[in-house]
Structures are given as C-alpha cells and as structure tokens.
Image (cartoon, rainbow, N blue to C red):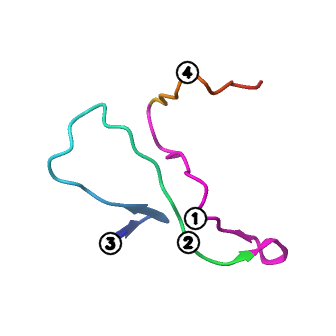
Amino acid sequence: MPKYTDEVFHVYLFGLKPGVVYGYRVHGPYEPENGHRFNPNKLLLDPYAKACKYPYFYTILY
C-alpha cells in the first residue's frame, strides 16, 4: 500500500462504491518465532472495517 500514517497503511481506490466486499492477501515469511505468520492462502479482514459480510456457509464461533 502506498500510504502510511500513524502506523496504519491506507489506500484510496477510485471508482469503488460503498458496500464493496474486499479482503487483504499478504505475502512474506512464515517465521512464528519472529512474529511473522504471512500466508497468501488466507484472506484477511480489514481491522478498521465498519461492518463484515460473510457467506452463509461460514459459522461464527463465540
């Protein structure tokens, strides 16, 4: 992501409208001993998202 402010990466994508569904796919080393657990096979949620929409076949565990 091109922008970084107050320890938060951010980006503005022109043309997207409210309600678009997205996630993050990150690449990097898998080194748990160093705190790195990158896995490009996982789709990550945005921790700053205001809502989360999920497919009906997922189960929310409490």
Q: Which residue is mark 2?
A: 27
Residue 30: x %, y % from top left: 72, 74
Residue denoted by label 1 = 40
Q: Residue furthest right?
A: 33
Give the residue type that dot 4 points to: Tyr
Disc 1 or 2, which lies upstream in sequence? 2
Q: Which x, y percent locates residue 62?
A: 77, 24
Residue at the far top: name it: 56
User: Residue at label 3?
Assistant: 2
Of mark 1 and mark 4, the one earlier in the sequence is 1
Q: Residue at x 85, y 75 (%)?
A: 33
Task: List the residue tagged with mark 4.
Answer: 56
Q: Earlier in the sequence, mark 3 or mark 2?
A: 3
Q: Is residue 3 magenta?
A: no
* Alpha carbon distance from label 1 to label 2: 5 Å
Mark 1 residue element: loop
Q: Secondary structure at mark 4?
A: loop
